[in-house]
Amino acid sequence: MKQSILLAAVLAVFSTSPVFAGGSLFGGSDSDSDDTFSEDGAGAMYGGVSVGQSSDGACEANNTLIDGINATTQSLLGTSVVSNFGCPNTTAWKVYGGYKIAPNLAVEGSYVNFGDAESTATVAALPPINNNANPVTTTTSATGFGASGVASAPVTDEINLFGKMGFLAWEKENKASSTVLGMNETLTQKTDGVDLSLGAGAEYKIDENWGVRGEVEHFDGLNANLYSVGATFSTF
């Protein structure tokens, strides 16, 4: 529901632009007037696809918690009870589109898939409670819809730097599986929210329409970072 509300808000912003109010998608007009678009880039629409790596800060937070537990059990039992989880980066991707409301200001909507991350830890053998060491496998997946304001500044005719701030409506699923006392157990937890997102990057213009964009983004609610590079297409 939260994702639907945010997506509707993004579409509402686009629907009020001159592109949707009249004229063609790529900058033409049904009339002879060219007031809708200016040569400085205001009124342009753009879109793109990026791929990269995402890191899960929540995994590192879990390891910090495990370190605290092991410190306690070391003092009481003389041994650690759980090993740290590996926190691998995962392949992530996103699609996005935007509308330039001014030469150096745009509104942008996106869909982000953070990929599937799998990591394993081990619960130590603690007879008579647990006679064998047991691996615990966790799988995490997350997606989100975002809306941001993007401010840019040209460095050269071909290179633009930009910063962005907005919100991401996200959903996340965590699964933990283990074998305890000969029984396979799987626990699933689903969470969602709408939280702040921040980003910065640079774009290189190959020609009037095509470009290459690299950026880093942070998503508060997921405690995740996304490092990506991709291709962009602009109407002009």
Image (cartoon, rainbow, N blue to C red):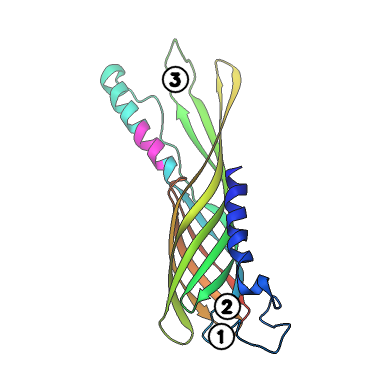
Q: Position of residue 46 (x, y in %)?
A: 60, 73
Residue 80's place in the image compared with 57, above or below, is: above
Residue at x 51%, y 51% (from the top left corner): 168
Q: Residue 147's x, y, as percent?
A: 53, 58
**Whether label 2 touches label 1, CB < 8 Å:** yes
Quarter occupied by the N terminus: top right
Query: Which residue is labeled 3 in the image?
Result: 125
- First in sequence, mark 2 or 3: give its number: 2
Instruction: State the CA–CA distance, disc 2 to disc 1.
Output: 7 Å
Splitting the image into 4 quarters, where does residue 32 fall? bottom right
At label 3, counting other C-alpha atoms closer than 10 Å, the crowd grade (few under 14, some 14-19, many 20 or more) is: some
- Secondary element at image label 1: loop
| Disc 3 secondary structure class | loop
Asked whether residue 211 is in view, the answer is: yes
At a point 61% along the width and 60% down the height, the residue shown is: 12
- The residue indicated by pointer 2 is 43
Q: How far apart are marks 3 and 1 (CA)?
A: 70 Å
Magenta segment boundaries in residue numbering: 60-65
